[in-house]
Image: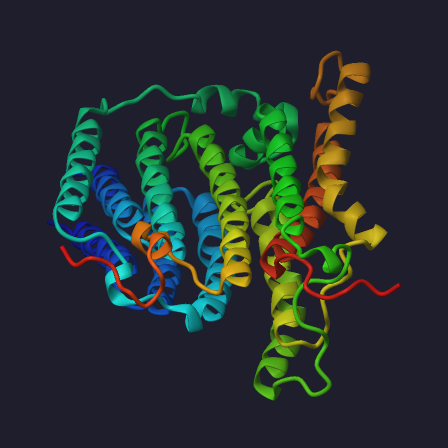
Amino acid sequence: MTSATLAGFVGAALVGLGLYGLIASHEPLRKILAFNVIGSGVFLVFGIVARKGASAGLPSDPVPQAMVITGIVVAFAASALAVALVLRLLDETGRVTLSPDAWTKPSGDGAEAE
Amino acid sequence: MSVLQALDIGLGFLVFAVAAWTVFARGAFAATVGYVVYGLLLSLVWIRLFAVDVALTEAAIGSGVTGVLLIGAAARLRGSETAADEKSLSGLPRVFAAGLSLLVAMALAGVVLLFPDEGPSLAPQSMQHLPETGLGNPVTAVLIAYRAFDTMLEKVVLVLAVVGVWSLAADPHWGGAPGEARAERPEPTLAFLAQVLAPLGILVGIHIFWVGADEPGGAFQGGAILAAMWIIVMMARLTEAPSTSAFWLRLALIAGPLVFLIAGVGGAVFAGSFFAYPPGFAKPVILFIEAFMVLSIAVNLPMMVAGPPRREPKR
């Protein structure tokens, strides 16, 4: 198994992990973290496309590399906007959760334990 | 199994384990610290894929600047940690989420196995035209020459993100300055770090931008390092963030995309097509554009980290 294939598997596993975190966590900050984990997993899978396109004396195809660099910067911009929204929510309401129970019931009541 | 292969497998497991930590850790703060480590480890994986430019970007932006942003947010959110039973899904939905994630990961792994050993590649074309750009680093050539429009629009995305962050300001703070005011007596350790690190970091940032024409590096990586230096000095409270209504600040924010766009339109007039560079004169034009891009990145990223204005504007 080449290091490129291995990196591809790691990328696939990261997408799975991040997706779970994105769905399962009710804390917005954790969702942002998980979203970034998905993003870097996708970049990694795309990165092995670059590695497998090695030719013309280059160890790696520069076009996917440039697109990943662009992607990393855009992912940061999206995270910054998301963090600003979360902090504004904190300022407005004093608490930050996306749990459906937390907003429909008076606080302190607790969510149903299933 | 060679030593390098064993290292690859070890690195893969380590990246996975740290990613699992950021997803499953109990506290948000601990998870965020894990994410910074994760970003640095990931840049090692990128080096193993021979993508040094990406590794530099991942370390500087993916791990460094994103880390500062998220740790700052986690610290502010600390007092509002929700009750444990509100933190995540439980019961059957949780099992479904795990199953779905596993399915997606398996499908992606299958796709990875299906990739042909020698994939389609644009590397020959990018090398063939490299002499015309006067550059030595094909990744920089893709970013600034072949896919220039893409990169210009990405700079616009950064400006839009700053506008988005600023527009979350409370009404009385609109036009004011974000972050903390300059401290009367800065924290000595942090001030010392900022005073020692910032001058060196500025040199490193400019160097990485300059060598980016021929070696790994470039406007993104150099600009991100310069941005980090400004963030450190602001965090040490040796200086304060400028007022968001300052004209020079707004000009610096848009200078990169603006110069890029003007050069692109100039290409239509002088070189025959939108975003074409005049033959024999390409490299100076590219470096000129890149210099303003570095400036804009170095101003945009700290403004995003600083967040919306939180102080009333001085009238």
- In the image, residue B149 sits, relative to residue B12, either above or below, namely above
User: Residue shown at 41%/42% (left/top)?
Assistant: B51
Residue B227 occupies quadrant: bottom right
- Where's the C terminus of chain B, which quadrant? bottom right
Q: Position of residue B167 (x, y in %)?
A: 66, 48
Q: Foreground residue, B216 or B180?
A: B180
Closer to us: B164 or B57? B164
Query: Which residue lies most toward the top here?
Result: B272
Q: Is residue A57 visible?
A: yes
Front residue of this view, candidates B245 and B198: B245
Query: Which of the 4 image quadrants contains residue B177?
Result: bottom right
Q: Residue at x 45, y 55 (%)?
A: B59
**In the picture shown, does residue B141 fall above or below B246?**
above
The image shows residue A93 at horizontal and vertical percentages of 50, 60
**Above or below, comparing residue B172 to residue B58 in the picture:** below
Q: Position of residue B93 (x, y in %)?
A: 17, 44
- At x 43%, y 49%, the residue is B55
> Compared to B54, does A114 lie above or below?
below
Residue found 33% across the figure and 43% down from its top? A38
Relative to the observer, which residue lies in front, B257 or B32? B32
Residue A76 point in image, percent of width and height: 50, 48
| Circle count | 0
Give the left or right position of residue B76, taking residue B276 as reference: left
Quarter assignment of residue A59: top left
